[in-house]
Amino acid sequence: MIYQFDFRLFSQKFTHPIITNYGIWETRESIIIRLIDEDHNITWGEISPLSWFGSETITQAESFCIQLPKKITKDIILNIPDNLPSCQFAFESALQKFPDEIILNLAYSGLLPTGKKALSQLTNLYEKGYKTFKWKIAVNDINEELEILKTLVSQLPTAAKLRLDANGGLTYSQAKLWLEACDHYLDKVEFIEQPLGVDRFLEMQELSNNYYTAIALDESIANLKQIEHCVQQGWPGIFVIKPAIIGSPCKLRQFIKQHPIDVVFSSVFETNIGRNAALQLASEVYQNLPKHRAVGFGTHHFFQQEQNWLQMLWNN
């Protein structure tokens, strides 16, 4: 099969900047790819890199797309190198045809704003149907954040869960303080995500063994090779997987089938193109897993996307 290939750069501003341990993120840049097969069927893919997680940069992804011929084959797609994981995901996803709106039986985790703003948004997101919430920590003073945690937990609706994401921004002693606090709220706090940096895997294993609160890896498993390494090292906790930067969805699907790990699929703030591909993959993988945790795709409220944005993008 030969495909006509084309692509467009796309950017959209967040309604509110994303504030994490890495700094302030104001605009999401991605590349939308289009494939047209010999029967004139059109499929789409989305390259949404997250370079500070270890994926390629948007510039590297664009350079790769520029050097491709206007007509490509499946073999070209399946031989995209591993140092372009976001490209791998986008092109392999585009080989499949997904409906515009995929309705899946998945629960979603809603992303709260950082700091005290999380308190005012909790009720709003709960009223939209979310029962799981994610809150970024290691952004402000630790004592202030621990006080906000107490209030957040007290305001959580019955049966709701809270996830804390440090993006690797805690010291070892700070991580112990957070885990000690969360051990008092085991019925409310689902897990702490990536408390330490990616070079401190053994320390996170030690923390996981010493506290009741679950720990999830995120930055430490940004690609499939890293997931394989952590599984081989006997990681006992949760794996937060961002499909859009993980690499080949086919290889990921096969790996989890062989190694039924405790997994959470999570967003990198894609458009509905990348989102649908990621959620389709999550739905397929979850069918073979005993535990179905809420997926981290509750991010719609961070964009004000125009309804016909894709058509307008291609007409420009």
Image: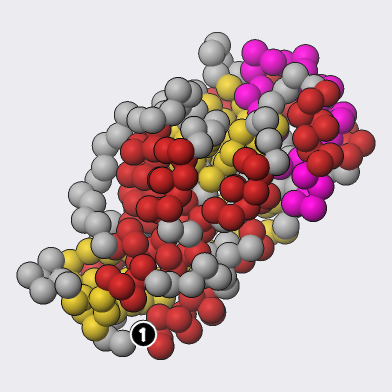
Q: Amino acid at mark 1?
A: Leu
Taking the image as shown, residue 160 lies to the left or right of residue 11, namely right
Residue 162 place in picture, x, y as percent: 62, 26
Query: In this view of the protein, which residue sits in the foreground, 26 or 242?
Result: 242
Please give the name of the residue rendered at 43% of the width and 53% of the height, measured from the top-left corner: 251
Q: Which stretch is magenta?
A: 175-201
Is there any visible trace of residue 203 in the rendered image? yes
Taking the image as shown, residue 91 lies to the left or right of residue 204, namely left
Say above or below: 168 vs 57.
above
Query: In this view of the protein, which residue sits in the foreground, 47 or 39?
Result: 39
Q: Which residue is mark 1?
A: 68
Residue 158 place in picture, x, y as percent: 55, 11
Residue 287 among magenta residues:
no
Residue 184 among magenta residues:
yes
Residue 89 place in picture, x, y as percent: 41, 60
Query: In this view of the protein, which residue sits in the foreground, 231 or 206?
Result: 231
Please tell me in which quadrant of the rendered image residue 207 appears.
Answer: top right
Please give the name of the residue rendered at 87% of the width and 30% of the height, measured from the top-left corner: 176
Residue 282 place in picture, x, y as percent: 40, 40
Q: Counting other residues with Cα less than 10 Å from the Cα at mark 1, is it few (<14), some (14-19), or many (20 or more)?
A: few
